[in-house]
């Protein structure tokens, strides 16, 4: 990236390359290229570039279910660039979409979490219950950090789900989602 320098009232092209390995410089570049709407979670191009119009929404929906954007000569998931843009640093781990919607990039819906915590935040509509045909009962179990935890066997699904929901809340805390 070239920066224009002004000397003695004359404008010259100066071959001053930005150090794009520096996180602070990367954050500056993100702020130069994009603007962010906190209400919608969308990013927009600030400048016209490579067929993009200033003010146009940044990012393309990728087949993996997330928006991606070309930034610093490679593709990044848009929510990671938003994190850099807003906090001035790359996320240390992975970005979790709290409500489970990978397209909802509002800052209030993003958090930097470990891979394990991100897995805990997946929806569990059955609340850790499964029907066991050999016992004709509902088993409740939950895997946390690679460890399988069992919470009993129950004759009816409603009781098993209540126990499962309580176990999920207790062991996964803020990451529990049903």
Image: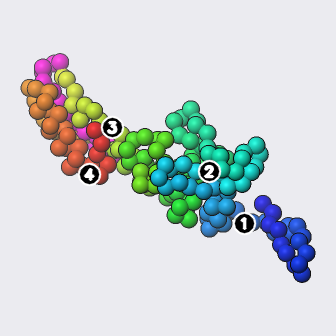
Mark 1 near mark 2, Cβ–Cβ under 8 Å?
no
Mark 4 sits on what residue? 173
The quarter in which the C terminus is drawn is top left
Mark 2 sits on what residue? 44
Label 2 and label 4: CA atoms lie apart by 35 Å
Determine the secondary structure under disc 2.
Answer: strand
Label 1 and label 4: CA atoms lie apart by 41 Å
Total residue callouts: 4
Determine the secondary structure under disc 4.
Answer: helix
- Please identify, in this view, whether the residue under mark 2 or under mark 4 is nearer the observer: 2
Q: Which residues are magenta?
A: 133-147
Mark 1 sits on what residue? 19
Local crowd at mark 3 within 10 Å, few (<14), some, or many (≥20)? some
Of mark 4 and mark 3, the one earlier in the sequence is 3
Front-most of residues 42 and 19: 42
Taking the view exactly as shown, the residue that stands out farthest to the left is 155
Determine the secondary structure under disc 3.
Answer: loop
Local crowd at mark 2 within 10 Å, few (<14), some, or many (≥20)? some
Looking at the image, residue 157 lies above or below residue 49: above
Q: Position of residue 157 (x, y in %)?
A: 14, 27
Determine the secondary structure under disc 1.
Answer: loop
Of mark 1 and mark 4, the one earlier in the sequence is 1
Front-most of residues 107 and 137: 107
- Residue 137 on the magenta span: yes
Of mark 2 and mark 4, the one earlier in the sequence is 2
Residue 120 has which mark?
none
Local crowd at mark 1 within 10 Å, few (<14), some, or many (≥20)? few
């Amino acid at each position: 990236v070239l920066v224009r320098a002004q000397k003695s009232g004359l404008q010259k092209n100066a071959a001053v390359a930005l150090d794009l390995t520096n996180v602070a410089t990367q954050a500056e570049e993100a702020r130069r290229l994009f603007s962010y709407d906190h209400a919608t979670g969308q990013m927009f191009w600030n400048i016209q570039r490579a067929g993009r119009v200033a003010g146009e929404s940044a990012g393309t929906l990728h087949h993996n279910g997330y928006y991606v954007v070309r930034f610093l000569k490679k593709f990044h998931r848009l929510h990671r660039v938003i994190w850099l843009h807003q906090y001035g640093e790359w996320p240390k781990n992975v970005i979790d979409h709290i409500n489970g919607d990978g397209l909802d990039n509002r800052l209030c819906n993003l958090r930097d979490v470990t891979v394990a915590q991100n897995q805990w935040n997946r929806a569990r509509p059955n609340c850790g219950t499964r029907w066991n045909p050999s016992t004709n009962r509902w088993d409740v179990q939950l895997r946390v950090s690679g460890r399988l935890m069992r919470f009993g066997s129950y004759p009816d699904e409603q009781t098993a789900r209540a126990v499962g929901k309580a176990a999920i809340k207790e062991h996964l805390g803020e990451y529990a989602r049903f």
